Image (cartoon, helix red, strand yellow):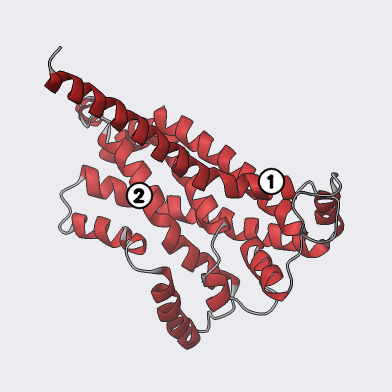
Amino acid sequence: MTATTRRTRLFDRLTRVAGAVVLVLILGFLLLPPLFVGVLSFANQEHFGFPPQEWGFRQYIEIGDSPAWGRAVLYSIGLAVPVAVLSVLIVVPAVLAIERSKLPGRRGIQAAGMSSLIIPIVAYAVAMYGVYAEVGLLGSYLGLVLANTILAIPFVLVTAGAALSQIPPDLELAAMTFGASRFRAWWQITLPLLLPAIFAGSLLAFVTSFDEAVFINFLGGAGQVTLPKAIFDSVRIGVDPVITAISTIFMVATSALMYLVARLRRR
């Protein structure tokens, strides 16, 4: 074995070791904070302390006993459900127009739909504050639904667009050859094949709206408190250990939804 070969193999081993160390550090940086919060959620004490002096389910029981947290969760769900539905109703026709038509400017429509991923959300919130103040939507439920829908649309657009690009248009052309109209070919052939991607996109839209914490602070009014806003207010006023249990439940539920989205996208 030549000296050059030995140096090459040594360099390869060092590279693999360095890569493994970097990977472990990244995973630790990502996973240790949520694990830390999860451990603290089982502390049977009124104040933060690590490690917990006593273990139990006090924080989870407090969630059930506090009507404020329950109202915040219900309000977040009440916003997220119509946002998911409205996003799908807007995106599905847009995706069909982008991928299955020769509509002028269709790529511009696609870029406009993705703009909320590029423009900072704070810039959106400041602009919407001025618009909503003029049209009377400031502090309204409808205004929050519309604002959250703008954030959710790109996720449905990406998911449904990627799925539709994998569906051969020849299936629709074959149906139209046998007498079906274009609308019937879309309705009975394309949409059923697109349903898993649509459902996955709607779940992403739901999570995006449920997790939104900027618009509610800029555009929300008195009595409009979502779960992220309730957590933020709790941390700002005084750190309540109950938020560890809420955060743990939120992380588990979000992870389960993301796993479901991944399964649906693989279909």
Locate residue 67, reporting x and y percent: 82, 62
Where is residue 26, by image quadrant?
A: top left
Residue at image position (53%, 79%) is 137
Q: Which of marks 2 and 1 is nearer the N terminus?
A: 1
Judging depth in this view, the residue of 76 and 52 nearest the camera is: 52
Side of 156 relative to 133 (left or right): left
Total numbered labels: 2
Give the residue furthest to the front: 3
Side of 39 relative to 21 (left or right): right
Q: Secondary structure under badge 1?
A: helix
From this viewpoint, is residue 168 visible? yes
Q: Is residue 26 above or below residue 113?
A: above
Q: Marks 2 and 1: CB-CB under 8 Å?
A: no
Residue at image position (37%, 47%) is 92
* Residue ID for mark 1: 38
Q: In which quarter of the image is the C terminus?
A: top left
Mark toward the viewer: 2 or 1? 1
Judging depth in this view, the residue of 43 and 149 nearest the camera is: 43
Locate residue 206, reporting x and y percent: 54, 51
Locate residue 70, reporting x and y percent: 76, 58
The circle on residue 194 is none
* Residue ID for mark 2: 157
Side of 156 relative to 40 (left or right): left
Q: Is residue 117 above or below residue 207?
A: below
Q: In which quarter of the image is the N terminus?
A: top left
Residue at image position (52%, 42%) is 28
Amino acid found under the numbered disc labelled 1 = Gly
Residue at image position (71%, 54%) is 244
Q: Secondary structure under badge 2?
A: helix
Give the residue furthest to the bottom: 134
